[in-house]
Every structure is written in structure tokens, then in C-alpha cells.
Amino acid sequence: MCGRYATTRSNADLSRLFEAVDVAEPLRASWNVAPTAPVPLVRMSKEHEGRVLDTARWGLVPHWAKDLKAGSRMFNARAETVAELRSFASSFAKRRCLVPADGWFEWVKDGKQKQAYYMTPADAAPLAFAGVWSAWGPESVLTCSVITTAALGGLKKVHERMPLILPADRWDDWLAGGGDSERLLRPLSEHDLEAIEVRPVGPEVGNVRNNGPELIAPARNITLF
């Protein structure tokens, strides 16, 4: 699963990158985003007649949930079932979004220890995770989930799952709503994923209270697999 990631770009940078109207709260760079944290997303808005950069609570809360606690368990949605499960189906059909990211973290167990890895484009290009969103309660609290898919190529050595990454030429179809789910949910090719660096990092990222660029610095004396 994708339970930690980094997103450090500013409102101005993201609104320019995604050609979106900025309606988000002022964004703070975070190198250790965890579920229930506020995160930037890009969605369609009837009011603004196009894309908007907005802020949502990470962990989708369906409109029928009793409280926001449900979102703490629903920060990921599986590509294989997102179009069918009651919790996500309506959002997948009508409320899809892009979740900007710099990279994401996973852990590999090595004996009694766990080694953290950071997956990020080698050229530091931004990523857009496929996501779904929903508005909950009388105050319409915006919440979202990141869609995951089966890992491919060398990423399988880190974890069996990975975020569904969408290149720019797929953003319009993803945000439009409707469409063929199999086509929309197809993963990147293994060739495209070769551009993703798998970087061993220090154990500090395991503590959600830690935050800073040092969390994504390469760990010393760690052999990659």
C-alpha cells in the first residue's frame, strides 16, 4: 500500500503545472505525508468550469459514514475493485482526482529490521497519483484516496503494490468522469517505470512526527537489494 509520500511543491507551482485554478489552503511542504493529513489534489469544478487545485483530508470518507474516522482506513483504493466497491464506486464514476506527489515510501523487512525506500523520478519530475474524492457531512469536508495497482518491474522488489501513476496525456480522461474503467486504470509500462529511482533512506521516516528533506536523503552503506 501507499501509506506515506512526499509532496513539497507550492500552490503556485501546482496550479501552474496542472493548469488549475488555485482554491486550496496554503500548502506546506511535507516529506512525510501520512493518512488523515491535509493534501493537495486536482479535481474538476463546475463553478470554475475546469480544473481546480484544492485541499483534502487523506482518507476517503463516504457520504454515508457516521464520522471522519472511517477515512483513517481508506487512504488507498485498489484499482482492481475501485469501480465496484460501495465505498469508492460513486467517487470513481463521478469524482476522480489527481494527487500531486514527489515520491512515495515503502518498507522492506530484513530480518527483524525494516529498511525504508523512497521511490521518486530520477529527474525529480512531479508525479500525479490517480485518486478519488468525496465530500462528507454538512460542511462538505473534502476527503480523498490514492488508487494503487500491482507493482511492476524492479518496484516489485520493494512492495507488491504501488500508486497508479498517470502521465499528463491521461489527465483529461481521468478527470472527466465516466469512461471505460479498464482503460482508465491501466498502469504505466515497465519501460516508463524505469525512470523511477528506488532509494534507500534512513529509519526516521517511520515516525510521522519527523518531517524535512533529510528524510529523502540516500542512506549510507545500504546495499540496494
Image (cartoon, rainbow, N blue to C red):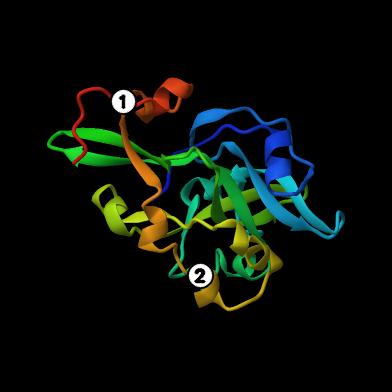
Q: Residue at x 53, y 50 (%)?
A: 70
Reading the chain from its start, which is encountered first: label 1 or label 2? Answer: 2
Left or right of 79, for residue 142: right
Numbered disc 1: secondary structure: loop
In front: 20, or 76?
A: 20
User: Looking at the image, is 8 positioned above or below residue 3?
Assistant: above
* Quarter of the rendering occupied by the C terminus: top left
Identify the element where label 2 is drawn.
loop
Q: Is residue 210 above or below residue 152?
A: above
Q: Is residue 201 left or right of residue 157?
A: right
Q: Quadrant of residue 49?
A: bottom right
Residue 144: horizontal and vertical position, in percent?
60, 51
| Residue 202 - label | 1
Q: Position of residue 216 (x, y in %)?
A: 41, 28
> Which residue occupies 63% across, 49% down?
143
How far apart marks 1 and 2 lie (CA) works out to 36 Å
Query: In percent of the image, x 72 and y 30: which residue is there?
Result: 26
Along the viewing direction, whichever of 83 and 155 lies nearer the viewer: 155
Residue that carries the numbered disc 2 in the rendered image: 85
From the viewer's perspective, tell me whether residue 17 is left or right of residue 144: right
Q: Residue at x 51, y 67 (%)?
A: 82
List x then y, in percent, for residue 78.
Answer: 44, 62
Q: Work out whether residue 210 can be spotted.
A: no
Q: Three-letter amino acid code at disc 2?
A: Leu
Label 2, residues with CA under 10 Å away: few <14, some 14-19, many ≥20: few
User: Does residue 127 show up?
Assistant: yes
